[in-house]
Amino acid sequence: MNQHRLFFSVLLIVVCCAVATGQQNFSTLDAFKNSVGRGEDRISVEATGDLNGDNLEDWTGVVHRKKSDASPTYQLYVLMRQPRGGYQVAQRSREEEIPGMGCCWVEDLQISGGSIYIQNNAKTAATMEAARHQFKLYKGQWRLVGIQIFYTDHSNDTSTDTDMNVLTGDVIEKKSKGDGKPMIIKRKKRFGLYLLKDFDFSNTFGTSV
């Protein structure tokens, strides 16, 4: 009797964990896409490429969910191709509500050089800003390693491009006005540890200490 109770207790824990974390392994990409593409939910952008140097094509994509009782959301998924076939969910971001009033929407998603690059855009009547966040599997963690911010103010005919290396703290800022020669400023900045699982699709993600 005690053995049966122990068995069912362990089974209950396993089932609860599976429900809480969601399915982690999929035989094909289509199987994963079908699991997240319910109702009006869809994958808005996706990219493929090798993320861990094993010469297998991994996948990343943003799931855009529409909800009747709340604002629509974004969530970034990373799936790793397994040597024996199939895919495993390696990481996922927060499921974040999409703000209105011109901020922020996902414009582009790429895999290059073992990194994930995701670009969000925001705009007002006179300004336009694009933020490109770079995530990489670094020392066992899916973390933010680089940020690029492109900001244009049409009312002043100025633009500022900022390139930040989160790992080294190097920041290169290029400021331009009209057709004049850009001014380049180099400086150091201390960045905190920002993980992909905490990514909130904000243009300011990772820019504070």
Image (spheres, grey):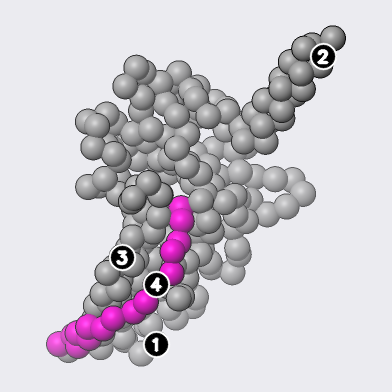
Is 119 contained in the magenta span?
no
Element under label 3? loop
In the rendered image, which residue does mark 3 sit on? 167
Q: Nearer the viewer, mark 3 or mark 1?
A: 3
Q: Which residue is mark 4?
A: 191
Q: Nearer the viewer, mark 1 or mark 4?
A: 4
- Amino acid identity at mark 1: Ser
Relative vertical location of residue 52 with respect to residue 105 in this rendering, above or below:
above
Q: Disc 1 and disc 4: Cα gap in Å?
A: 31 Å
Q: Report how far apart the C-alphas of labels 2 and 4 lie in the structure.
A: 53 Å
Mark sitting on residue 2: 2
Can you say which quadrant of the picture contains the N terminus?
top right
C-alpha separation, residue under disc 3 versus residue under disc 1: 35 Å
Label 3 neighbour load within 10 Å: few <14, some 14-19, many 20+: some
Q: Position of residue 14 (x, y in %)?
A: 67, 25
Mark 4 is on which residue type?
A: Phe
